[in-house]
Image (cartoon, rainbow, N blue to C red):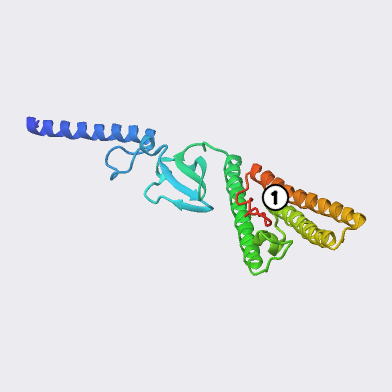
């Protein structure tokens, strides 16, 4: 029987050893969900598990094509959801089971919808306010509309300040009329006193009328002072203009 050279036996043994090592490594890699050798760089299951595979923002689903969960037996499932300034973001990862439920995603979406509705409402209100201001700016003010805001004049969107201003306008008008009458009575009383001609009765009536007129003027001036004082206590500025108090 011909003897096999030792070098040949060594080569055969090395070949068998390499083959067994390769088979064992492949078996281990397959059990873990991916090949660790000889599969041209395919990652293992442990490497892909928990890795982000996609995101969804404001209803737009964006997949990460560089991550394929299915090649190691995993699925691209929702892992987290959060709200931020421009929407609701859902993060997807390579998982066996989703980390968040569809109810949590819906709650995130609902919060975003409520946020959008609030923003839209504010924008609509701001637009209406701008239109009212623009409309009210061209309206000429009179005795009872002096100092009112353009929004109040244009659309009736009056604030507390406008209400106070209207009260001031009305009260100021009454006091101005009363003050004018008091001054007129002073003048008439003075004429009656001058033309009394020594008649005690006429002189007495002229003095009484003059006294009443002076008291009326004092009351009018006191009322103006009180108006300005109250408005100043309420924190309004420029409320101390005589005979024309304003909240502006």
Horizontal relation, residue 145 to residue 95: left or right: right
Towards the viewer: 74 or 216:
216
The relative height of residue 51 versus residue 159 in the rendered view (above or below) is above
Place residue 182 in its image quadrant.
bottom right
Across and down, in percent, residue 200 comes to: 90, 54
Picture coordinates of residue 80, whole percent (x, y): 50, 39
> Mark 1 highlights which residue?
160
The quarter holding residue 147 reads: bottom right
> Residue 78's x, y, as percent?
51, 42
Q: Residue at 39% across / 51% down in the picture?
A: 65
Crowdedness near tag 1: few (<14), some (14–19) or many (≥20) residues, C-alpha within 10 Å: few
Q: Residue furthest right?
A: 201
Numbered marks: total = 1
Q: Residue at x 75, y 58 (%)?
A: 176
Choose between 201 and 212: the one closer to the eye. Answer: 201
- The answer to whether 34 appears left or right of 130 in the picture is left
Q: Quadrant of residue 183?
A: bottom right
Residue 36 visible? The answer is yes
Observer able to see residue 5:
no
In the displayed structure, does residue 156 sit left or right of residue 41? Answer: right
Can you give x and y, in whole percent of width and height, for residue 32 in the image?
38, 33
Front residue (pair 210, 62): 210
Residue drawn where x is 27% and y is 41% of the image: 38
In depth, the one of 172 and 39 nearer the eye is: 172
Q: SS of the residue at dot 1?
A: helix
Viewport quadrant of the C terminus: bottom right
- Image quadrant containing the N terminus: top left
């Amino acid at each position: 029987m011909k003897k096999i050279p030792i070098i040949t036996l060594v080569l055969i043994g090395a070949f068998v050893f390499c083959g067994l090592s390769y088979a064992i490594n492949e078996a281990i890699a397959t059990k873990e969900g991916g090949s660790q050798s000889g599969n041209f760089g395919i990652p293992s299951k442990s490497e892909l598990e928990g890795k982000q595979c996609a995101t969804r923002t404001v209803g737009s689903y964006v997949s990460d094509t560089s991550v394929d969960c299915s090649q190691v037996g995993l699925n691209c499932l929702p892992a987290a959801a959060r709200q931020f300034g421009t929407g609701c973001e859902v993060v997807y990862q390579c998982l066996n089971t989703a980390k968040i439920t569809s109810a949590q995603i819906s709650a995130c979406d609902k919060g975003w919808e409520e946020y959008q509705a609030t923003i839209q409402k504010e924008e609509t209100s701001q637009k209406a306010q701008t239109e009212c201001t623009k409309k009210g700016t061209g309206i000429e003010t009179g005795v009872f509309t002096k100092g009112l805001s353009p929004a109040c004049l244009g659309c009736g969107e009056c604030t507390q300040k406008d209400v106070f201003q209207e009260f001031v306008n009305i009260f100021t008008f009454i006091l101005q009329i009363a003050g004018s009458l008091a001054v007129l009575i002073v003048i008439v009383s003075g004429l009656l006193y001058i033309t009394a001609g020594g008649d005690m009765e006429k002189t007495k009536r002229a003095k009484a009328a003059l006294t009443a007129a002076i008291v009326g003027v004092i009351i009018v001036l006191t009322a103006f002072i009180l108006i300005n004082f109250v408005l100043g206590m309420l924190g309004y500025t420029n409320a101390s203009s005589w005979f024309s108090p304003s909240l502006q």
